[in-house]
């Protein structure tokens, strides 16, 4: 994931989610995120979460509690898929794949 395109608050939410999930074994509730980051309201948390989902950084199951999952596009299978695909594609397709890899923060070269 390319964290340079995220706001400071969004990075803080991701860091909190990562630490909380590693420590507790499940994702935090919106109220726990609010308290942990000192945000003004649960709706502020929801807005940050929705923006992170829209950016493709988080995944959540609608209607399910504690379902937030940080997506990792740097997974070795994803990187390998990019590399293998680039071996047999046209120059134009390679440009598109390199741009996509850059957006996702994947090092394919």
Image (cartoon, grey):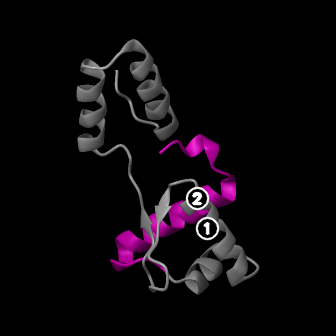
Q: Which residue is located at x 40 percent, y 22 percent?
A: 93
Q: Position of residue 3 (x, y in %)?
A: 55, 45
**Above-or-below relation of 94 to 107:** above
Secondary structure category for the residue under label 1: helix
Q: Quadrant of the C terminus?
A: top left
Secondary structure category for the residue under label 2: helix
Q: How far, Cα to Cα, is label 2 from label 1? A: 6 Å
**Above-or-below relation of 102 to 41:** above
Q: Quadrant of residue 38?
A: bottom right
Read off the magenta span: 1-28
Q: Is residue 15 left or right of residue 26?
A: right
Q: Which residue is located at x 55 percent, y 62 percent?
A: 53
Which residue is more in the foreground, 97 or 13? 97
- Name the residue beneath numbered marker 2: 54
Marks 2 and 1 close (CB-CB < 8 Å): yes
Of helix, strand and loop, which mostly describes the magenta segment?
A: helix
Q: Residue furthest right?
A: 40
Q: Position of residue 2 (x, y in %)?
A: 52, 42
Which label belongs to residue 50?
Answer: 1
Q: Quadrant of residue 81?
A: top left
Q: Position of residue 105 (x, y in %)?
A: 46, 37
Count of picture labels: 2
Residue 25 shown in magenta: yes
């Amino acid at each position: 994931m390319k964290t340079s395109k995220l706001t400071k608050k969004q990075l803080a939410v991701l860091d909190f989610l990562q630490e909380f999930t590693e420590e507790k074994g499940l994702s935090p509730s919106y109220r726990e995120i609010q308290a942990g980051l000192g945000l003004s309201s649960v709706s502020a948390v929801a807005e940050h979460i929705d923006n992170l989902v829209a950016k493709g950084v988080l995944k959540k199951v609608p209607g399910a509690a504690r379902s937030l999952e940080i997506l990792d596009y740097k997974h070795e299978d994803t990187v390998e898929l990019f590399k293998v695909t680039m071996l047999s594609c046209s120059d134009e397709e390679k440009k598109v794949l390199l741009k996509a890899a850059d957006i996702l923060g994947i090092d394919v070269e």
